[in-house]
Amino acid sequence: MGSWISGFTDGEGCFAVSVIRNSSTRFGKQIFPEFVITQSAKSLLALQEAKDFFGCGSIVLNKRYDDHNEHLYRYCVRSISELHHVIIPFFDEFPLRTYKRNDFEIFKKVVAMMYEKKHLKETGWNSILKLAARTNRRKIRS
């Protein structure tokens, strides 16, 4: 099952590090890492299998209003503890084989820093922002 989930993630998953506005936080923004696998309603069972395998996270509906006929579902893990203790060790044991491996390695560093509460200090915050800018769509985050 492990190799299947790793391959499935290579094709349909991502390791995202978003920065969202949140005026109640110290820096006015929040760092938001999440592991996601997305599928159409036809393949919802595959997401349920991944959720059952990991024993954490949730499956959420992501409604579509474009020219597609089906809504999407997302299996998401957002808990820093679950990312640190469950998701990251799994992908260390069953490595990704596509370019997503690079995003995973950066994601792993961000989660480790957040697990150690380094994001609560300005130096750690800035280091995480620099790492986050190197993942996914290569957005500039400040």
Image (cartoon, helix red, strand yellow):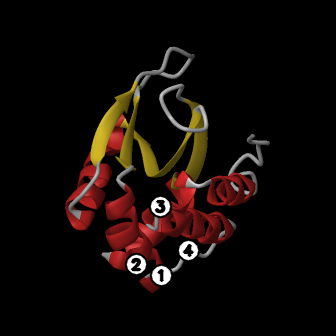
> Which mark, by number, is residue 92?
1
Q: Amino acid at mark 2?
A: Pro
Q: For the residues labelled 2 and 4, say whether their Cβ atoms are less than 8 Å apart.
A: no
**Res 134 → quadrant:** bottom right
Q: For the residues labelled 1 and 2, say whether their Cβ atoms are less than 8 Å apart.
A: yes
For mark 3, give the secondary structure: loop
Q: Amino acid at mark 1?
A: Asp
Q: How packed is label 2: few (under 14 Cα within 10 Å), some, or many (20 or more)?
A: few
Nearer-N-terminus badge (2/4): 2
State the image coordinates of residue 82 (x, y, percent, origin top left): 32, 62
State the image coordinates of residue 41 (x, y, percent, origin top left): 34, 35
- Total labels drawn: 4
Picture residue at 45% right of the left edge, 81% below the top: 94
Picture residue at 39% right of the left edge, 68% below the top: 84
Q: Amino acid at mark 3?
A: Lys
Q: Nearer the viewer, mark 1 or mark 4?
A: 1
Q: For the residues labelled 1 and 3, say whether their Cβ atoms are less than 8 Å apart.
A: no
| C-alpha span from label 1 to label 4 | 9 Å
Q: Dot 4 corresponds to which residue?
A: 96
Q: Dot 2 corresponds to which residue?
A: 89
Q: Dot 3 corresponds to which residue?
A: 117
Q: Nearer the viewer, mark 2 or mark 4?
A: 2
